Amino acid sequence: MIYDFIFLRHGLSTANENGILQGQHDYPLSEEGYLQAKYLSEYWQEERTTFNCIISSPLGRARETAAVIAELLGTDIVFDARWLERQLGEAQGKTYTSLQQTSSDWIPTPYEPPFPGAESEWDLYLRAAEAVQSLFLNDPGQLLIVSHGALLSAALRTILGQPPAAGRVRPVRFSFHNTGHSHLRFNRTTARWTLHYHNRTSHLEQQAGQT
C-alpha cells in the first residue's frame, strides 16, 4: 500500500510582501500569490496530476491556495488545524525589521518559547508529528497537504527522525518557497519513506520562461 504525500507551502501572502511575521495571524494571498497557485494548478493539470483529496490549514493564505487548486483539478478540500503555522505569540504581526532591532543573541532551549505566547520547538515538533500521523487515517493514494513553512519543515524533521536537540541549538530548517512543494512516499508494506524531491517550483520557472 502506497501513500504519496505532496507537501505544499501556500502562495505569497500580503504579509510576505510586507516583511511581516505571520504565525497564526490571518493574511490573504497577494495578487502574485494567487497567480503562483494558478500557475501550479495549470502545471499539474498539464501533467495530469490528480489527488485523492486536499488537506489544508484553515488560515486564509493556505485556504485560498487550496481553493485555486481544488477548483481546477476538481478535488475536495478538508481543513485541519493541525496544519496551522507555528504559533509565534507576541511576535505575530510585527515586521522582521522591528524584531531584528529588538532581538538579542539569546537562543531558547527547545522547551522554551522564542516569544511570549509562542510554541516552543518541542510544541511545534509534537504537533507536526500528530499532523503527519493523521495522514494515515486516509486511504492510500496521492494526498496534497497545503500548509506553512515552519510547520512543513517540522513535519519533514519528524519523518526523518530529527527531534529538537537538548541544548541551545537551532534545528535543521527545510526551506519551502511560496508554492514550493515536496514529494514523499510511504510504502506501508515495507514501512519505508522515500523523498522524491524537495521544494520544487517548476511551475514558476516555466512561467518565467514564457514571459
Image (tube, rainbow, N blue to C red):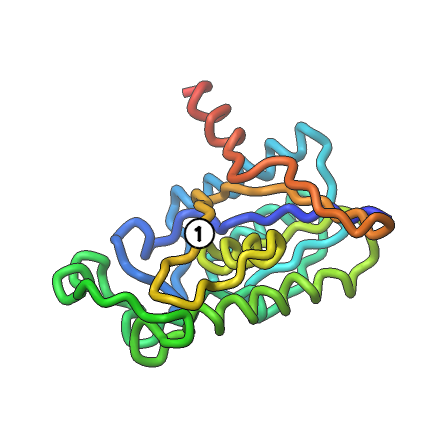
Q: Residue lying farthest front?
A: 167
In this rendering, the count of numbered labels is 1
Q: In this view, does 184 lie above or below 98?
A: above
Quick check: 112 left or right of 59?
left
Residue at position x 69%, y 41% in the image:
194
- Judging by the rendered image, the residue that carries numbered circle 1 is 172
Considering depth in this image, is 167 or 210 the residue closer to the camera? Answer: 167
Instruction: Indicate the quadrant where residue 22 lies.
Output: bottom left
- Residue 23 in percent (x, y) is at 39, 66
Which residue does the image show at 55% across and 63% down from the upper left? 57
**Residue drawn at x 64%, y 35% as measured from the top left:** 44
Viewer-nearest residue: 116 or 33? 116
Task: In this rendered view, identify the residue nearer to me: 70 or 21.
Answer: 21
Q: Could you say whether the residue bearing mark 1 is in a helix, strand or loop? A: loop
Q: Residues within 10 Å of mark 1 (few under 14, many from 20)?
A: some
Give coordinates of residue 162: x percent, y percent.
Answer: 54, 57
Q: Tell me which corner region of the image, top left, top right, bottom left or bottom right, holds residue 15.
A: bottom left
Up/down of 79 relative to 64, above or below: below
Q: Is residue 36 left or right of residue 98?
A: right
Q: Reply above or below: 99 against 8.
A: below
Q: Which amino acid does label 1 sit on?
A: Val
